[in-house]
Image (cartoon, grey):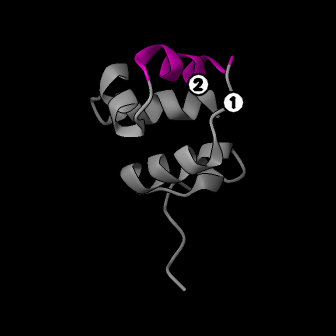
Amino acid sequence: MALRIRDLREDNDLTQAEAAALLNVSQATYSRYETGTLAIPYSLLEILADHYKTSVDYLLGRTGNPKPYPPK
């Protein structure tokens, strides 16, 4: 998961500070999410999935398909 979060951030040309601001956490906390030393709360995964237009399952590594699920 940490690698996907980092890769998506870099693919979208965001700095760690910008991603941290999106989640309302410090840059140091966000850095720990990317290194896997701190578990990211589910509520923040939802924010990232919405921002990057993907699914939480993709962020978690449960699917290789980055496309979001269709709305119900």
Q: Earlier in the sequence, mark 2 or mark 1?
A: 2
- Residue 41 in the figure: left or right of residue 11: right
- Residue 71 in the figure: left or right of residue 20: right
Asked whether 32 falls inside the magenta stretch, the response is yes
Q: Is residue 23 above or below residue 62?
A: above
Q: Position of residue 23 (x, y in %)?
A: 42, 38
Residue at 56% in and 22% down: 34
Which label sits on residue 33?
A: 2
Picture quarter with the N terminus: top right
Of residue 50 and residue 66, the one placed in the foreground of this image is 50
Circle 1: element type: loop
Q: Position of residue 47 (x, y in %)?
A: 46, 50
Task: Give the image quarter of residue 16.
Answer: top left
Q: Are marks 2 and 1 in contact (CB under 8 Å)?
A: yes
Q: Which residues are magenta?
A: 26-37
Circle 2: element type: helix
Residue at 67% in and 44% down: 60
> Total of numbered circles in the picture?
2
- Residue 59 in the figure: left or right of residue 17: right
Query: How much space separates mark 2 and mark 1, taking CA atoms?
Result: 6 Å
Q: Which residue is mark 1?
A: 39
Picture quarter with the C terminus: bottom right
Q: Position of residue 7 (x, y in %)?
A: 46, 30
Which label sits on residue 10?
A: none
Residue at 65% in and 54% down: 57
Q: Is residue 65 above or below residue 31?
A: below
Q: Amino acid at mark 2?
A: Tyr
Residue at 60% in and 50% down: 58
